[in-house]
Image (tube, grey):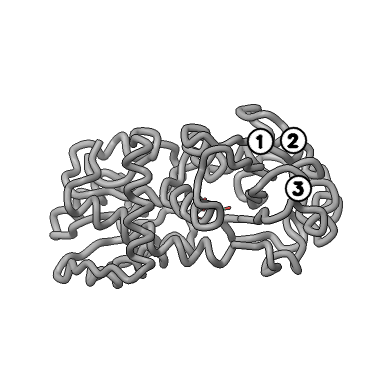
Amino acid sequence: MKGLLTLKSLSIDQIKQIINLAIDFKNGLKVDFTGKKMVTLFYENSTRTQYSFQMAMLNLGITPLSFNLAGSSVYKGETLYDTVRTFESLGVDGVVIRHTQDVYYKELDPIQIPIFNGGDGTSDHPTQTLLDLMTIYEEFGRYEGIKVALVGDIAHSRVAHGNAEVMKRLGMEIFVSGPEQYNDHTCPYIDLDDAVKTCDVINLLRVQFERHKEDMNITKEEYLQKYGMTTERVSRMKKNSIIMHPAPVNRGIEIESDVVECERSRIYKQMTNGVFVRMAAITMALRGELRY
Ligand code: NCD
């Protein structure tokens, strides 16, 4: 298969190559794929990922097509495979897919055009991980030894799962923090008050209400005070440390509203970097340099 499905099957060198190309794009590199067309197939809601992929396509001269799920044959029972195979037959050069099912791309093995994973269930979100890594690299100039706290709803977060795997391989020290009911025990636990004193990156995660089977058992105000990033916690952060969040943010729950655009926050920079990492992934895949 071609494209970018998960970073788990890429080597550290390949991952760094994508990020280096993204940095080249940010510094003005131009690549032209005029005449190519790609489609974004989003079976789950998205603002940043979907439109950032479309911006990346436009910057590369690729024509983006949007898929209107509600008006599509998915509601006549068409399978994911048949939908993707249809776009391939229409002459599309690549597809970006976000789907509720973990590892949905397994059933797409016969597809020849590149597939880009825009998020699968609670499993993985490779371009989010790349943009997070690019943001960290721009800040610190290295990965080795950088301490990251993944904070919040770890269990339901594909961002947490994807980031933890690659960040560990890059020699970063990963901790998790947040309510016990959302801790999946894949990394050592750190109390948020210790994390703000000792970690270089506070990587906040959205409380994923839409994936919860039960209520949180805690009010939003209590969540913010116990597990959220407040201005008071910001004032106790380690020197030169930063706050990241994949967004959308729940203001007043995992992050106090004033923290969203505070001096330590890189949330909007992450979004900007997202366009460049997607340009890099598309370029490498269309050149046949990313395959599984
Ligand atoms: C994330 C996602 O959809 O996984 N958002 C994003 O792509 N920027 C995180 C989230 O929805 O909480």
Q: CA distance from mark 2 to mark 1?
A: 6 Å
Q: CA distance from mark 1 to mark 3?
A: 12 Å
- Residue 86, position in %: x, y? 19, 53
Return the disc, 1 or 3, that comes first in the chain's sequence. Answer: 1
The crowding category of the residue bearing disc 2, from other C-alpha atoms within 10 Å (few below 14, some 14 to 19, many at least 20), is some
Q: Nearer the viewer, mark 2 or mark 3?
A: 3
* Residue pointed to by mark 3: 196
Answer left or right for 212 relative to 257: left
Taking the image as drawn, is residue 209 in sight? no
Which corner quadrant of the image does residue 282 belong to? Answer: bottom left
- Residue 91, position in %: x, y? 13, 59
Give residue 190's mark.
Answer: 2
Residue type marked 2: Ile
Which corner quadrant of the image does residue 95 belong to? Answer: bottom left
Return the disc, 2 or 1, that comes first in the chain's sequence. Answer: 1
Q: Nearer the viewer, residue 207 or 59?
A: 59
Q: Nearer the viewer, residue 139 or 175?
A: 139
Q: Nearer the viewer, residue 22 or 117?
A: 22
Q: Residue at x 85, y 52 (%)?
A: 225
Residue type marked 3: Val
Return the disc, 2 or 3, that comes first in the chain's sequence. Answer: 2
Q: Are marks 2 and 1 in contact (CB under 8 Å)?
A: yes
Which corner quadrant of the image does residue 234 belong to? Answer: bottom right
Q: CA distance from mark 2 to mark 3?
A: 10 Å
Residue type marked 1: Phe
Taking the image as drawn, is residue 201 in sight? yes
Q: Looking at the picture, does residue 289 appear above or below residue 58? A: above
